[in-house]
Image: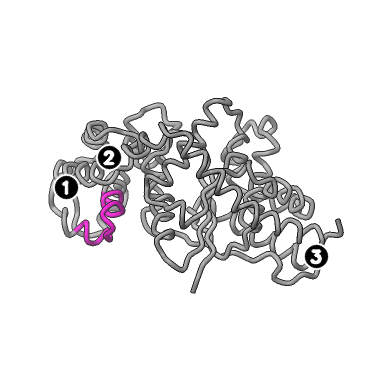
Amino acid sequence: MSKKIFSGVQPTGNLHLGNFLGAIKNFVDLNKEKENECIFCVVDLHAITIKQDKGQLQNNIRETAATFIASGIDPNKSIIFNQSKVQAHAEGSWILSCMSPMGWLNRMTQFKEKAGKDKEKASVGLYIYPILMASDILLYDTTHVPVGEDQKQHLELTRDIAQKFNKDFNCEDFLKVPEPLIKKKFSRIMSLKDGLKKMSKSDPSDLSRINLTDTKDDIINKIKKAKTDSFAIPSEEHDLIDRPEAVNLLGIYSSISNQTLVKTLEEFGGKNFSDLKKDLAEVLTNKISPISDEIKKLINDKGYLDNILKQGASKAEEIAGKKIREMKKIIGF
């Protein structure tokens, strides 16, 4: 059965292995399935919930688009565009905001985590971010959304908003209720320096992550210095309990090699971490180095990237613009 896929990545710059294995690798697989209609968005409106440098934001938008293409997403098969070029996203977000109860937003745990103790200083945009996400998804009659565990609650909100709109305006099935595509294994890649923290570009230590623009030598050095424990690698999954760094490195190897953790444990059970690190560095450089080289090549061709984004925005506007016009008629505008 064909699926209409929508997902997005914030143009925050410095995309890393966690972004690739947690999201982009899945996008590439979905793009390859002939029956799927895929839309991949550089969600630059979401990015400005935190103040951005103008020039750097423009560079990051291009770099995110370059990463999509370098990783294997075909712009001739899938739509790639940046969100701010399609006005329907912001307009849809306002309409949906007007019929979404504040109580629903108050339950969103990600706002509480990001705002922390200074929630009074957090932007309104950060608070209503999930409604803009709902607009992104619903404007394209999306049937399936690839999400990580951290966005699952937001997708549940999107489903609630769609059902409420349809009920409030007596227009059954006008806004399609999307299903999640949740990657069960290795969707959350952790820091190379602390197996309990998610890999992040905001970590002050560059050794904590593999950047998608890292050189071969960078990758080898970072894996060599990655934190481990003092025990041998087990052969059984239950022996990995309370060993977060071991779980992380074995998970990364499994994901990049497209195999199960059970298979990886069969391969390395009883061996030392030096053996795993040697092989992990090899599979990572084989996979990431060509992507890194292609990203750098594409970034130097701004005209090509801008044209891809312009063409994608035109296609997206045709779909989302039609939906927003229908939505206005339903409301009474």
Identify the residue position indicated by label 2 in the image: 289
Q: Earlier in the sequence, mark 3 or mark 1?
A: 3
Q: Position of residue 219 (x, y in %)?
A: 26, 35
Write the residue at 62% across / 59% down.
Answer: 140
Q: Residues within 10 Å of mark 2 (few under 14, many from 20)?
A: some
Q: Position of residue 215 (x, y in %)?
A: 27, 33
Give the residues drawn in magenta, as a range.
250-265
Q: Identify the element where label 3 is drawn.
A: helix
Residue 284 highlighted magenta (yes or no): no
Q: Amino acid at mark 2?
A: Ser
Identify the residue position indicated by label 1 in the image: 232
Q: Quadrant of residue 239?
A: bottom left
Q: Is 159 left or right of 9, judged from the image as shown? A: right
Q: How many marks?
A: 3
Residue 262 highlighted magenta (yes or no): yes
Write the residue at 38% across / 52% down.
Answer: 25
Q: Earlier in the sequence, mark 1 or mark 2?
A: 1
Residue closer to the observer: 21 or 301: 301
Identify the residue position indicated by label 3 in the image: 168
